Image (cartoon, rainbow, N blue to C red):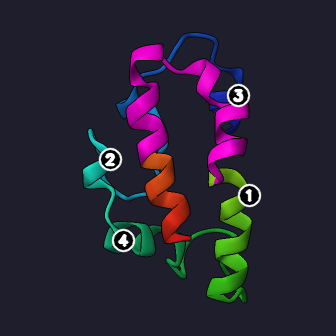
């Protein structure tokens, strides 16, 4: 995320750091199973000694559609806005 903040060129859907452990090219590829594997992975830094509820709450602060739109959407190609917002919605509903 820190690298994304300093990136000045516009980004496409598939260039965003989606919270899954594989490349995705459509919102349909972001499944609940892949999200759970990423978010609740016990080896993920920062996940130590935290409940799933605590992890979900902290991630929702990043992936909430309104917050995401305000901070990130302006850095994305306009033609990708609908699919990016759809994917963010999938993630927020999971959390």
Q: Say whether disc 4 or disc 3 marks the residue closer to the N-terminus.
A: 3
- Mark 4: which secondary structure? helix
Residues under labels 4 and 3: Cα distance?
27 Å
Q: Say whether disc 4 or disc 2 marks the residue closer to the N-terminus.
A: 2
Residue 42 vertical placement versus 29 (above, below): below
Residue 79 vertical placement versus 86 (above, below): above
Looking at the rendered image, the quarter that the N terminus falls into is top right
In the rendered structure, find residue 27 and report the number of the disc placed on it: 2
Q: Determine whether label 1 and label 2 are within 8 Å by CB.
A: no
Residue beneath disc 3: 5
* Few, some or many residues within 10 Å of mark 3 (<14, 14–19, 20+): few
In the rendered structure, find residue 32 and report the number of the disc placed on it: 4
Start-end of magenta stretch = 64-86
Mark in the foreground, 4 or 3: 4
Q: Residue at x 33, y 74 (%)?
A: 33
Expressed as whole percent of the image width and height from the top left, the position of residue 23 reads 30, 45
Determine whether, in the image, residue 87 is placed left or right of residue 23: right
């Amino acid at each position: 995320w820190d690298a994304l903040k300093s990136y000045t060129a516009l980004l496409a859907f598939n260039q965003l750091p989606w919270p899954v452990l594989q490349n995705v090219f459509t919102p349909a590829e972001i499944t609940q199973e892949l999200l759970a594997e990423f978010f609740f992975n016990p080896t993920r830094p920062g996940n130590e000694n935290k409940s799933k509820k605590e992890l979900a709450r902290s991630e929702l602060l990043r992936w909430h559609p309104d917050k995401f739109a305000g901070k990130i959407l302006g850095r994305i190609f306009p033609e990708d806005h609908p699919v990016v917002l759809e994917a963010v919605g999938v993630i927020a509903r999971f959390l």
